[in-house]
Image (cartoon, rainbow, N blue to C red):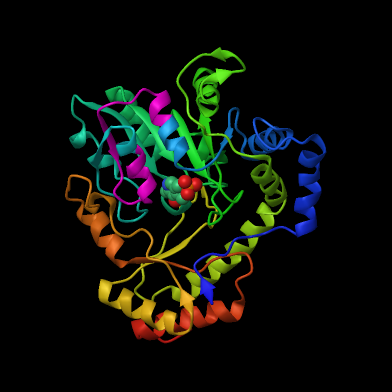
């Protein structure tokens, strides 16, 4: 069976070697030495001043909303993973959906201002599939209207804009290190604050708001363990190699599927893309479903990602976003992972082209 993604695992001995340091100290969580080393290596790798390693990519969104004291309305995208919306709801805020740009699937900045009301306090946008939002436009609108900006950069590890990490934008950016993501620690995530003051607040939030017997603020348990940090330390050594392999698979899909009638991402010149996903948008939902059927017959499981559009969730107030709804009905991500075999990729391409009635080239 071929899944849309496959978790990269380092050689087992490398993992246990690193873990031995935790064993020797009998120290498995609470700012352990592996966690501190991972944070330091991630900051160097991504070129960031602040970064806190946390237990997943959802709690960090909630911590971000809390630290920025967001109440009321949050302008957000209908085309993301459900955690983007549920974090807003969980913090008792109201998601206000703004439709997406049909070329890069990120929030369309030209539609944001019309959605701002006296209750709007923040914009929470996603760098969809690791492709950057129009950060200049979003940040400009936020500044002009006194709004905070949070980027859900769960897909954006290793993506850059003119040499600067996408995690370095907004008041706060968050990332997920879940096992299905490009860089993973099993479960995990991180939060990146642009100011040291915010970073200190988030550091406290992560550990219940207290340091030893001094209680400074409310908090939550956002900590992660030495087991997860060890996985991160192992995987970070392979990340460039993994990305190179995915890049060649990505370019191969792109070359073979060019002219087939599928819409694909077109990274602009100033974007250094991380090759995290290979989304394709079909001409219709019917053809998408036919393709999924043809792939499943050969035990290839692509993913309707993202589907449904978040403005259509049964527990939010529906607001029309016609582009996001149309893309969500017709998009899927093709399998892309470190050891996807060329023959399998060829089979996937052939099956999709057959449904589209396009000759292989
Ligand atoms: C994966 C993901 C999350 C949630 O991350 P977890 O680590 O699974 O909690 C949030 N937002 C987006 C866009 C994601 O893809």
Q: Position of residue 338 (x, y in %)?
A: 62, 64
Give the quadrant of residue 207: top right
Question: Percent x, y for residue 108?
Answer: 29, 45
Q: Nearer the viewer, residue 138 or 259?
A: 138
Question: Residue at point 29% right, 24% down?
Answer: 144
Q: Residue at x 64, y 45 (%)?
A: 228
Determine whether 199 is above or below 54 in the image: above
Above/below status of 330 relative to 108: below
Magenta stretch holds residue 244: no
Assess whether residue 72 is covered by the magenta stretch.
Answer: yes
From this viewpoint, is residue 33 visible?
A: yes
Q: How many marks?
A: 0
Q: Position of residue 72 (x, y in %)?
A: 25, 28
Asked where in the image residue 324 lies, by quadrant, the reply is bottom left
At which x and y percent is residue 160? 54, 44
- Check the picture and name the quadrant holding the N terminus: bottom right
Q: Residue at x 78, y 46 (%)?
A: 18
User: Residue visible at 53% across and 22% down?
Assistant: 204
What is the span of residues highlighted in magenta in the rendered image?
64-87
């Amino acid at each position: 069976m071929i899944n849309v993604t496959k978790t990269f695992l380092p050689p087992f001995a490398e993992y246990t070697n690193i873990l031995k340091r935790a064993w020797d100290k009998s120290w498995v969580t609470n700012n352990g030495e592996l966690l501190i080393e991972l944070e330091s290596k991630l900051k160097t790798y991504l070129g960031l001043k602040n970064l806190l390693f946390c237990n997943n990519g959802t709690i960090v969104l909630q911590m971000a909303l809390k630290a920025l004291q967001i109440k009321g309305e949050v302008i957000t995208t209908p085309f993301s993973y459900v955690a983007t919306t549920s974090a807003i709801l969980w913090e008792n805020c109201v998601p206000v959906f703004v439709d997406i740009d049909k070329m890069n699937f990120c929030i369309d900045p030209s539609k944001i201002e019309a959605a701002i009301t006296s209750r709007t306090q923040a914009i929470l946008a996603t760098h969809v599939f690791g492709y950057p939002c129009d950060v200049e436009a979003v940040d400009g609108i936020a500044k002009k209207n006194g709004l905070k900006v949070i980027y859900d950069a769960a897909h954006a590890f290793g993506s850059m804009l003119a040499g600067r990490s996408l995690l370095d934008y907004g008041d706060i950016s968050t990332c997920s290190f879940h096992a299905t993501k490009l860089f993973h620690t099993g479960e995990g995530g991180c939060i990146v604050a642009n100011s040291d003051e915010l970073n200190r607040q988030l550091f406290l939030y992560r550990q219940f708001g207290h340091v030893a017997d001094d209680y400074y603020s409310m908090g939550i348990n956002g900590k992660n363990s030495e087991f997860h940090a060890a996985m991160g330390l192992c995987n970070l050594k392979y990340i460039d190699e993994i990305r190179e392999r995915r890049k060649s698979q990505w370019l191969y899909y792109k070359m073979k599927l060019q002219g087939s009638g599928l819409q694909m991402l077109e990274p602009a010149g100033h974007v250094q893309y991380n090759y995290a996903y290979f989304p394709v948008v079909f001409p219709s939902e019917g053809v998408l479903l036919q393709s999924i059927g043809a792939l499943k017959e050969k035990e290839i499981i692509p993913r309707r990602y993202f589907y449904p559009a978040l403005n259509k969730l049964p527990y939010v107030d529906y607001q029309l976003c016609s582009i996001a709804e149309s893309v969500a009905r017709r998009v899927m991500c093709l399998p892309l992972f470190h050891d996807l075999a060329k023959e399998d990729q060829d089979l996937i391409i052939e099956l999709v082209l057959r449904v589209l009635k396009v000759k292989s080239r």
